[in-house]
Image (tube, helix red, strand yellow):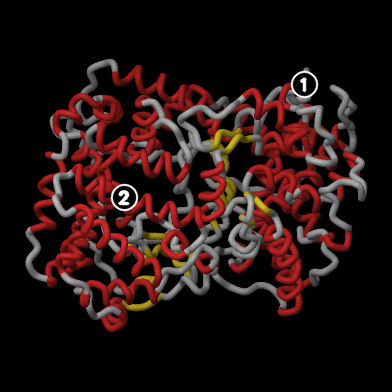
Amino acid sequence: MKQSFIIALTIMTLAACTKQQTTGIDLQNLDTTVVAQNDFYQYACGGWMKLNPLTAEYARFGSFDKLAENNREQLNGLIREIAERQQKHGTVEQKIADIYNLAMDTARRDREGITTLQHTLDDIAAISDRSELSRLLGESMTYGIWAMYVDADEMNSSMNILKTCQAGFTLGEKEYYFDTDENTAKIRDAYLKHVERMFTLFGYNNADALAQTVLRLETRLAGAAKNNVELRDPMANYNKMSVEELKQLVPEIDWDTFLGAMDIHTDSLSVGQIDHLKECGKMLADEPLEDLKTLFLWQTIDGAASSLSTELYMANFDFFGKVLSGKEEPSPLWKRAVGVVNGTLGEAVGQMYVKKYFPPEAKERMVRLVKNLQIALGERIDMQEWMSDETKAKAHEKLDAFYVKVGYPDKWRDYTDLDIDPALSYYDNLQRAAKFEQKYSLSFIDKPVDRNKWYMTPQTVNAYYNPSTNEICFPAGILQYPFFDMQADDAFNYGAIGVVIGHEMTHGFDDQGSQFDKDGNLNNWWTKEDKEKFEARTKVMENYFNTIEVAPGVFANGAFTLGENIADHGGLNISFQAFRNATKDAPLQTRDGFTPEQRFFLAYANVWAANIRPEEILQRTKSDPHSLGRWRVNGALPHIDMWYEAWNVTEDSPLFVAPADRVRIW
């Protein structure tokens, strides 16, 4: 049932929810050898970092990961209880049990080797005519040079539409193919050796030449792709056209054959990145057929490597785990198996999870907290002197229209048509699951958007804002310590989960979300003057983060991380406002040596406590739109006036930013 959140509701103080409350602050997390005003991240999180050193399987281990570990152990208990018993065929329990047991059976995969993949490799090798490529690309889910998916139409958000997006280059970020710094060059060389090694393991004699072909073609595709900053422009990545217009745009592809092979029936679609798709067509037409087949062979091998033998899994890990991220060992097999079950039958597992681990009172308290944050955001909108009354009214309309999801969906997904057969190989069953998922996704083409559909499973340690449905979602998985503590007072919960809630709300008003109206359509609801003022203020944040040196000679990308940084900034301001509102009639006291305001900021910082490897810092700077954990604290707090007041931060602090230079948006 759709939740209705009325902004005029009287604020309810969360302190009344429990009889005896703690501060929620674990003093062991602190590093009191550091001056808080000089390095707040180290002060608030240094103890946690010492108590939670990186293990061999992690490139980064933080509060999110620790909670995810706890959730994973809980899920493993639930799954193993099912997997250890004989289950009736066709039931959800049978599917969970069999996919888990198949994932755990490395001995069988080692015996089978590459035999389960051989028929796919043979099909690619047998192609003798370029005209077959369109059918091949449509039939396959393990390779491709562009991708298709279904989502809301940005100009008609009540309806779903088929969309394309750029793909085909394994390293994911185009910078890996073109940047010339020493680290990127080493990764590119290591990638070439990795491709060669994998071809060798699959029995190809000319592995060196094949690897060179793969890198050349992937570089061509990456060259036509947009970078991560360009991908953040929703208007530039919306190009709706008819299928007939698509045929004229990219005539080298037989679109009737391609769409028919995917069983897609539609008259229109949105092409995400036109130049990239045009380049795909040209490449299919002018590259040697054998070279194109080599690329598809590689994509098949790469996509299957983690589900075949131990030798192939470890070869894959050596590059993607060790070289790219700095990991020393892969995660234990049982963790990988739980991840596969989660990815295959996520909501079925989630239904078991919330039944056992998410009490109704936690959802009730969270719903009240969300209401309070909405009120606070409304107040913050009214406080902005740079915004006209006309734009404020539109902002309030959007805020009032937020669709809020907490904990778990009201209707669970049906997995009846997913057939998991233990007589087949692990790889073949994963292919079945992928086909099931593809069919499910494509079934929404040209149909009304289902606002009750969840885009995360309940056990996920995360949250999201979706601009096309104007919704915020907080799965049960994140509603636990250190984000949410039923026994802690408001200073803690507003500083932790409160800021997360405010963060997701602010995404509706960041540089991307602000381009969508209350109904989720790409539609400018700003006056021209207000939009210019908003962009000038966001530019201050972009420039500030551009100056942050995340590694020697490597700087943060302020444009790429802008949306997340705005959301952190808004989340802090909004949640602090809500915290003040919630406790004004019953102020909290100084406890454990900290004022309530200080505890608010300590709780916030602890959310981002983490240890991270140097390799992972470099990878995330290229690929992650979020700032690194250290800078979500030391980069965000210097723009929050209340932090200066709570911690008596003066001009002597290296974190000090003059009031006139601080970001002031929401």
Q: Nearer the viewer, residue 381 or 560?
A: 560
Question: Is 69 on the left or on the right of 319, as rendered?
Answer: right
Q: Residues within 10 Å of mark 2 (few under 14, many from 20)?
A: some
Q: Are marks 2 and 1 in contact (CB under 8 Å)?
A: no
Q: Is residue 76 above or below residue 62?
A: above
Residue tagged 2: 193
Residue 17 visible in the current orientation: no
Q: Nearer the viewer, residue 216 or 445?
A: 216
Give the distance between the C-alpha atoms of the residues marked 2 and 1, in whole angstroms.
57 Å
Q: Is residue 523 above or below residue 477?
A: below
* Local secondary structure at mark 1: loop
Question: Is 358 on the left or on the right of 16, as rendered?
Answer: left
Q: Amino acid at mark 2?
A: Lys
Q: Amino acid at mark 1?
A: Gln
From the top left corner, tell me how far across and down residue 340 is, in percent.
34, 35
Q: Mark 2 or mark 1: which comes first in sequence?
A: 1
Q: Nearer the viewer, residue 576 or 543?
A: 543
* Local secondary structure at mark 2: helix
Q: Residues within 10 Å of mark 1 (few under 14, many from 20)?
A: some
Residue tagged 1: 21
Quadrant holding the C terminus: bottom right
